[in-house]
Amino acid sequence: MRFVIIGGGPAGIQAATHGARLGAQVTLIERDIVGGAANLWDCIPSKAMIATGDVLTLALRAQKMGLAPLNPGLDLEAISTRVHSITQRLADSTISLLDSQGVRVIEGSARLRSSHEIVAETPGGEEIEIEADAILISTGSRPRVPEWATVDGDRILTTRQAYPPPVIPEHLVVIGSGVTGVEFVHMFRSFGSRVSLIVSRQQVLPSKDPEVAAVLEADFLASGVKLLKGARAVGLSRTEDGGVLVSCDDERKVQGSHVLFAIGSIPNSEGLGLEGAGVFVDGAGHIPVDHHCVSNLRHVYAAGDISGKLPLASVASMQGRKVAEHVMGLDSRSHRHLDYEKAASAIFTEPEIADVGLAEAEAFAVGRKIRVTKVPFAANARALIDGDPRGFVKIVSDPATGVVLGGSIVGKSAAELISVIALAVTAHLKVDDIVESLLVHPALAEALAEAAE
C-alpha cells in the first residue's frame, strides 16, 4: 500500500508512524517544520511561555507561601532561546521516530496532479513525482486576519509573531475572546503588560459553561484586565506615538502599544490541486469527511484542522491513527470510530480550564435530564496547601444509570485532572466507579471523587 501524506503535523505524523508499523509504504511531504506549524509554532511555544509566566506569578506570590519577597525579572532573550530549544527538540525527536519507522520524508510543497499522483517540489526547485494508493491531506491552518487589518509583525501581531514578541507590550489589545485569546491575555498579563480584551459576545469563552467563564472573567478583572463586552473590532489605525488604536462597531475605541489577533484560523487548502483532482472543498476551505476521515474520493482522506472537525492536536493525532487503520483495512476488525463529542480540551489560563463530554447548558438546551454535582477547590486540602483554592469540579451524569456524561474543571492542574473524567466518559463508567477509587490524600483529585458522590 503506497500511502502518501501531505502535511507533517500531529495528524500526518501519527498516520505516518502508525501506517508504517501496519506495513504501508509511507511518504510524508512537509514544507515547513516536521511536527506541524500549528503545533510547534503556536501550541507548544504558547504553553512554554505560559509556563514561564506562571513561575513568575508564583514567585511574586512568595510571601503568601511563607517566603521572603522575590523580585524576578523577565529575560526576553532567554525566553526565546528556551522556546526554540523545546520546539527543536520535539521536531528532532519526531524526525528520528519517522526515520526509525522507515517513513520517507520529503521537504517541500506538494500538489495533486491527479487523484493518484502527487508532485512534491523541493526548496531547490526539484520536482518529485509520487504514485499513491491512498492520500492523506493534513496541511493544517494559519491565523485568520480580517480584511481591514495588515499584520506588520511589530505592533500588529498574529499568534505566530508572539512567541515571543519583539518586545513585551506595554499595553496589549487582544481581539478575540476564545481559547487562544484568553490564553494570550493570561500570558501577557503575567509578564506585566496591561491588557484589554475585546469580547464580541457577553462573556469570554462564549462556547463554554457560563460558570466556567465567570471564574475566568473575575480573575481577569481582579488583575486589572479591561473587558470590552459586546464589542466587535472593525478597524485599526496607528497613532502618532507609534501605538495602535482599535475601533469597535459600537463606537468604542481602545488604544494600546500592540494589537494581537486571535480570531480563529483558515485551513491551508489552497495550491494543493484539490479541485482539479476531484476532491471537494467547501466554501470555508475545509475538506468535508465522514467518520473514517474519508473525503468524497474513497482513497483521499483529510485530518486535522483542514477536516473542519475539532481543531485540537489530540483530535488530529487520533484522526491520523484512524486514517492509517482504515487505509490498511483494520476498520473491518477491531476499530472504534472517533467520537468528537468525547474529546477533552483545556485552556491554559490561570486558573486552568478543562472540559469533556456533555455540558450542562447543552443538556438543558435539548431538554435532557441530567444530574449535576459541583465541588469547590476551596474545600480541598491540597488546594489550600498550594495556596490556590480557586475554581471547582463539576460532573454531569445520567440520573437513571449514574453513567458519567461529561464534566468541567476550573483550577490548578485542570488539564491533568480532566483525564479522569475523560476516561470515565469514553469507557461509560459510572460516578460510583470514581467514588470508590482509592485516591491519594491530600490531592486535588479528591475533588473528583467528592463531585461524583
Image: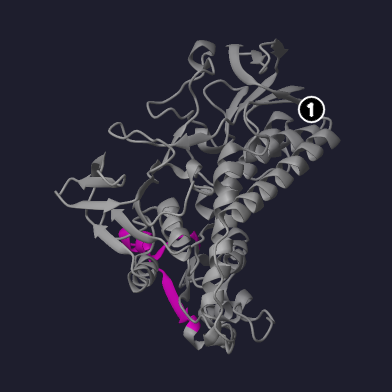
Residue 252 located within the stretch drawn in magenta: no
- Dot 1, how many residues are within 10 Å of its Cα: few (below 14), some (14-19), or many (20+)? many
**Image vertical order of residue 306 relative to residue 344, above or below:** above
Q: Quadrant of the N terminus?
A: top right
**Image vertical order of residue 372 relative to residue 17, above or below:** below
Q: Can residue 60 be spotted in the picture?
A: yes
Position of residue 238 measured from the top left corner of the image (x, y, whole percent): 27, 41
Residue at image location 69% in from the left, 48% down from the top:
85
Position of residue 205 measured from the top left corner of the image (x, y, whole percent): 37, 57
**Image vertical order of residue 43 relative to residue 32, above or below:** below
Residue at image location 45% in from the left, 78% down from the top:
374
Of residues 137 and 191, the one nearer the viewer is 191
Q: Identify the image quadrant of residue 445.
A: bottom right
Residue range corresponding to the magenta coloring: 355-377
Q: Can residue 338 be spotted in the picture?
A: no
Position of residue 29 measured from the top left corner of the image (x, y, whole percent): 68, 25
Q: Which residue is mark 1?
A: 24
Of residues 134 and 118, the one nearer the viewer is 118
